[in-house]
């Protein structure tokens, strides 16, 4: 059985990533890319579907941490026989991708055990394993080849590779697992010690750019390193998460593949990167956006593959039982075919933000934006599936319409600010028309609140973003009523639900955790309302949910006190970064300091 979601840590090489459990098992790894088939899939099934465990044979007390400002994981095992540290990392990639594990003796003599089960195709394909003349362990199936090099004697039996060995004080035993195409020659031996130094330098040099965030600098730095690890370096695309089908409710069917790039993350991503000072990463993300959406505007998608791929066909893996029996396990994401009007606002908002931050020439991509707006003018009155990708019937979602307003608003601002040519009078007219439409049909006078969809009594956490995007001022009584309604109806144990799944027509059975980004949005709204103590309380509660190495999942289940959903989640870490910098820029000095009476 896989570990709790929050008991995993992330390592990666900015092209793919692995999840390592507290007890030293690599239970998830897709090679060679984030969206490739997994060769370790025990996370979504059983050990027989692929894992790599290294740990003491006897019971141990386990602690772990990342080396400061790096993605190098150090797990310390204290046993009755002594102590060892397991160092896990993936060096910045050259031609091949490697996963390096170093077992370092700290004290005494510790008997150790290794178990390696490699299964390509999400646990379905048993590779052919053999040893080469130089002693390299090699596994091949179809296009994939994985090699393992170590001085430890490996034993193969029943399609499993095992080893038993002893680590003494001062000794370091390396294990280097590498991936390359099966038609390539076996790659040269990697110097594990040199690779560790190179990896440490890479991350620490990168971390030096980060703009301080006061008392939250450590949390922000860890979130930014996580976002960097979720970036596909060759293209600049950032995956929503490195996993698929980790459930939003344990045992339920809300299990989705998040190894793709969502347009809904566009503006948040640019804001987080520019706030932190990472201009080159922001430029790469903006360039990915422009390439991904290039083409006919009527073919704009809500998400793309990490290189801009458009075909993300969804299918299921019946041989995997799912995380804690949460079925089905889905590969690909059918939501890529949905109409979601909010992505138009995200796109135009991101490009406007890029111009104001000097990320590109002011006219870069402008012709495409004008064409996109021409298309949006024709379709904004249509119902859609909404930001949450509901699989029920399309609706007129209030937030979707508000984001259509934002698209015309930001285009107008770009034209006015940077002297760009476009039908600005028409955009202003459409902006006003959409604003009036949302205020007329998206606001319920009886509830005193905006609602999820026209004619509905449902609330939605995205309504918290209306003052954030500038749709209405924070002191507008309709915004104040909306915030109160969400506090009363969608806040559970201090966490904000996306919407009430038991009454929403989303085409799925009820039940999920609280979406963490939504809870950060509430903190942001409190800041705008100058409710500093409420904002600090909300933000601090969310920070307390991070696991022992600073990572957040998509959602949190207060009933089970567990993280749920895909992990680690870019949306959650983006929200954390932006909220922290929001405190730094908006709050008065007394509000950014801990209250000593509450310590």
Image (cartoon, rainbow, N blue to C red):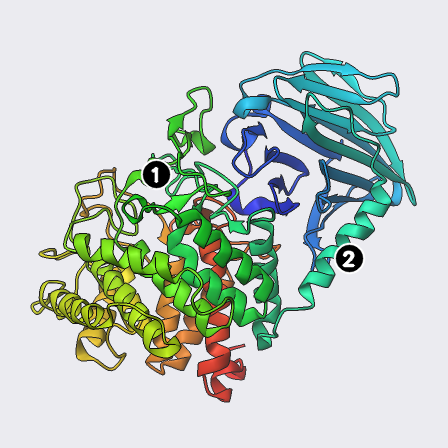
Other-residue count near label 2 (Cα within 10 Å), few / some / many at <14 / 14–19 / ≥20 = some
**Residue 160, percent across and down?**
69, 18
- The C terminus, quarter of image: bottom right
Q: Visible in this render: residue 222?
A: yes
Q: Is residue 540 visible?
A: no
Mark pair 1, 2: CA separation: 40 Å
Residue that appears at 61% across and 43% down: 15
Image position of 362 (left or right of 299): right
Residue occupied by mark 2: 201
Q: Secondary structure at mark 1?
A: loop
Task: Identify the residue shown where x is 45% and y is 39%.
Answer: 309
Residue 459: percent from left, percent from top = 20, 59
Q: Nearer the viewer, residue 257 or 254?
A: 257
From the viewer's perspective, is residue 142 above or below residue 76? Answer: above
Residue 403: assigned label: none
Q: Residues within 10 Å of mark 1 (few under 14, many from 20)?
A: many
Task: Give how far across and how far down residue 533 sits, in percent.
Answer: 41, 79
In this rendered view, identify the residue nearer to me: 280 or 70: 280
Q: Nearer the viewer, residue 51 or 135?
A: 135
Judged from the image, the secondary structure of the residue bearing numbered disc 2 is: helix
Q: Earlier in the sequence, mark 1 or mark 2?
A: 2
**Can you tell which of label 1 and label 2 is closer to the viewer?**
2
Residue occupying image coordinates x 41% and y 20%: 318
Residue 88: name its quadrant: top right
Residue 372 location (% of width, % of height)? 30, 55
Residue visible at 26% across and 79% down in the picture? 473
The residue positioned farthest toward the bottom in the image shown: 589
The residue at the far front in this view is 421
Residue assigned mark 1: 254
Relative side of 500 to 237, left or right: left
């Amino acid at each position: 059985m896989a570990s709790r979601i929050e008991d995993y840590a992330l390592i990666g090489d900015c092209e793919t990533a692995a999840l390592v459990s507290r007890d030293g098992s690599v239970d998830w790894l897709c090679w060679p890319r984030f969206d490739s088939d997994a060769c370790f899939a025990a996370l979504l099934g059983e050990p027989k579907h692929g894992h790599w465990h290294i740990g003491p044979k006897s019971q141990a007390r386990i602690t772990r941490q990342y080396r400061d400002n790096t993605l190098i994981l150090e797990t310390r095992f204290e046993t009755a026989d002594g102590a060892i540290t397991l160092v896990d990392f993936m060096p910045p990639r050259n031609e091949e991708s490697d996963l390096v594990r170093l077992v370092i003796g700290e004290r005494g003599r510790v008997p150790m055990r290794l178990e390696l089960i490699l299964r390509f195709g999400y646990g379905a394909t048993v590779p052919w394993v053999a040893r080469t003349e130089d002693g390299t362990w090699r596994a091949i199936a179809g296009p994939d080849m994985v090699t393992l090099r170590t001085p430890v004697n490996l034993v193969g039996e029943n399609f499993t590779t095992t080893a038993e060995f002893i680590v003494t004080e001062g000794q370091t035993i390396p294990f280097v697992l590498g991936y390359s195409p099966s038609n390539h020659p076996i790659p040269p031996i990697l110097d594990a010690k040199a690779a560790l130094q190179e990896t440490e330098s890479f991350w620490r040099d990168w971390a030096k750019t980060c703009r301080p965030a006061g008392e939250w600098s450590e949390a922000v730095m860890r979130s930014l390193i996580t976002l960097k690890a979720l970036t596909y370096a060759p293209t600049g695309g950032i995956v929503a998460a490195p996993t698929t089908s980790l459930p939003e409710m344990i045992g339920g069917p809300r299990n989705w593949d998040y190894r793709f790039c969502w347009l809904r993350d566009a503006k948040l991503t640019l804001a987080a990167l520019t706030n932190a000072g990472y201009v080159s990463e922001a430029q790469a993300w903006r360039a990915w956006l422009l390439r991904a959406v290039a083409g006919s505007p009527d073919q704009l998608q809500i998400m793309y593959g990490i290189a801009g791929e458009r075909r993300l066909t969804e299918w299921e893996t019946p041989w995997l039982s799912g995380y804690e029996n949460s079925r089905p396990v889905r590969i690909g994401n059918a939501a890529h075919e949905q109409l979601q009007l909010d992505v138009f606002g995200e796109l135009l908002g991101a490009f406007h933000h890029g111009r104001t931050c000097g990320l590109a020439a002011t006219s870069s991509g402008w012709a495409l934006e004008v064409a996109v707006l021409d298309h949006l003018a024709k379709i904004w009155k249509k119902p859609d599936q909404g930001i949450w990708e509901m699989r029920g019937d399309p609706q007129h979602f209030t937030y979707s319409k508000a984001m259509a307003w934002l698209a015309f608003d930001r285009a107008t601002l770009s034209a006015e600010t940077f002297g760009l040519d476009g039908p600005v009078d028409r955009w202003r007219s459409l902006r006003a028309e959409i604003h009036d439409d949302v205020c007329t049909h998206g606001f319920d006078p009886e509830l005193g609140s905006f609602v999820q969809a026209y004619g509905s009594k449902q609330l939605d956490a995205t309504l918290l973003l209306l003052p954030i995007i500038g749709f209405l001022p924070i002191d507008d009584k309709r915004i104040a009523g909306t915030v109160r309604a969400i506090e009363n109806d969608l806040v559970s144990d201090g966490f904000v639900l996306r919407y009430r799944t038991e009454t929403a027509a989303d085409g799925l059975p009820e039940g999920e955790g609280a979406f963490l980004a939504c809870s950060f949005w509430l903190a942001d709204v409190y800041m705008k309302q100058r409710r500093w103590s409420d904002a600090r309380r909300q933000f601090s509660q969310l920070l307390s949910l991070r696991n022992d190495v600073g990572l957040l999942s998509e959602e949190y289940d207060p009933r089970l006190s567990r993280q749920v959903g895909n992990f680690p989640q870019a949306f959650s870490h983006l929200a954390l970064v932006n909220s922290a910098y929001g405190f730094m820029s908006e709050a008065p000095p007394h509000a950014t300091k801990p209250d000593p009476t509450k310590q």
